[in-house]
Image (cartoon, helix red, strand yellow):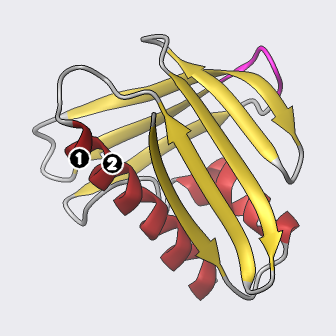
Amino acid sequence: MITVSTTVKNKTIAEVWDFFTNPIHVINWNFAGDDWHCPKAENQLEVGKSFTYRMEAKNGESGFDFTGIYTEIEPFSKINYVLADERKIFITFTEIENGIEIIEKFDPENENPENMQQEGWQMILNNFKKYIEKN
């Protein structure tokens, strides 16, 4: 599995959870670079239900739907889901001394090198941190 993480400062666990799961916020941080964006997000945060986040290049040349089905949810603590290609993702939210730590662990896909996947997912998590800390 590949692991990425960040620590959000000066926010409550409830705020972090909301910014991470609420489509109103997801569209503002769920992309790896400045040349991409997330124009649409839908989320049914219940076990057995799904989410779909549209990720697109701003120039319109490429895009894809990032979709999964929730397998386990513990509010303010854990989100697990499986992607359409059956890869598993495990996310934890933990209150620590200097903030809220978010750790994501995920099965790699077979098309891109693992270091590239880790870098891309870390960039998205960094965008989340930057977005929530300024709002």
At mark 2, the secondary structure is helix
Residue at 44% x, 30% y is 66
**Residue 129 percent location from the top left of the image:** 54, 73
Total number of numbered discs in the rendering: 2
- Determine whether, in the image, residue 17 is placed left or right of residue 60: right
Per the image, the residue denoted by label 1 is: 115
Q: Judge whether 66 appears above or below 83 on screen.
A: below
Residue at 69% x, 31% y is 80
Magenta stretch, main secondary structure, is loop
Distance (Cα) linking label 1 and label 2: 5 Å
Q: Does the magenta segment cover residue 133? A: no
Q: Is residue 22 visible?
A: no
Identify which residue, 3 or 20, lies in the foreground.
3
Residue type at mark 2 is Gln
Residue at 64% x, 25% y is 81
Residue that lies at the very extreme toward the front in this rendered image: 1
Q: Residues within 10 Å of mark 1 (few under 14, many from 20)?
A: few
**Residue 124 percent location from the top left of the image:** 41, 57
Per the image, the residue denoted by label 2 is: 118
Residue type at mark 1 is Asn
Using the rendered view, name the quadrant where residue 69 is placed.
Answer: top right
Which region is colored magenta?
46-50
- Determine whether, in the image, residue 61 is placed left or right of residue 8: left
